[in-house]
Amino acid sequence: MDQSTTKPALATADIMKVLQLLPHRYPILLVDRMYDMDRDESCVGVKNVTINDPFFQGHFPQYPVMPGVLIIEGLAQTAGALCVHSLGEGYKAELVYFMGIDNAKFRKPVVPGDQLHYHVRKIRNRGRVWRFYGEAKVNGQVVAEAEISAMLADTAEARAFASKNG
């Protein structure tokens, strides 16, 4: 095969790399690994859903269902980690602000034992603000989808944003 037509391998991130890319930690970290990371264009995040996830204690004890808002949060975390990754090894986001959700739809419950695949694709970005379309899938079937917006910020920007909007 001609070297000029060969596409570079897409990046992956194990849990240790995800922890470097995101400020989130357990119990709110909802991404276990990532693959097919194509610059800031697209990727897939993975969440292994287990009965040990803390939200199942109350949602719902007799029929455990992952809350839809957490599925959307997982899509947002995947998109945020992709953005940080695309900025290179030297960039460390202190905060990833979830700015908006549009056109969210929930199609099927997610239960313990499922493996969620968060498929995110960039719609556009301006500066440190990105907009993504995301689909959460289990066994290839869409269980939720939404358009999400996120902003990367450092601590000084976060304080200025809070004082201006607080």
Image (cartoon, rainbow, N blue to C red):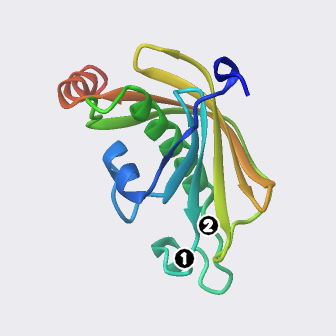
Q: Position of residue 30 (x, y in %)?
A: 48, 58
Q: Which label's residue is closer to the chain start, 1 or 2?
A: 1
Q: Quick check: 11 left or right of 110?
A: left
Which residue, given by chain and number where applicable, does mark 1 sit on?
A: 56
State the quadrant of the C terminus: top left
Q: Position of residue 72 (x, y in %)?
A: 59, 48
Q: Looking at the picture, which amino acid does disc 2 mark?
A: Met
Distance from label 1 to label 2 (Cα)?
7 Å
Mark 1 residue element:
helix
The quadrant in which residue 117 appears is bottom right
Determine whether 162 is above or below 44 in the image. above
Determine whether 77 is above or below 63 in the image. above
- Residue depicted at x 27% and y 34%: 92
Q: Position of residue 98 (x, y in %)?
A: 45, 36
- Residue depicted at x 28% and y 23%: 161
Mark 2 residue element:
loop
Q: Looking at the picture, which amino acid does disc 1 mark?
A: Phe
Which residue, given by chain and number where applicable, does mark 2 sit on?
A: 66
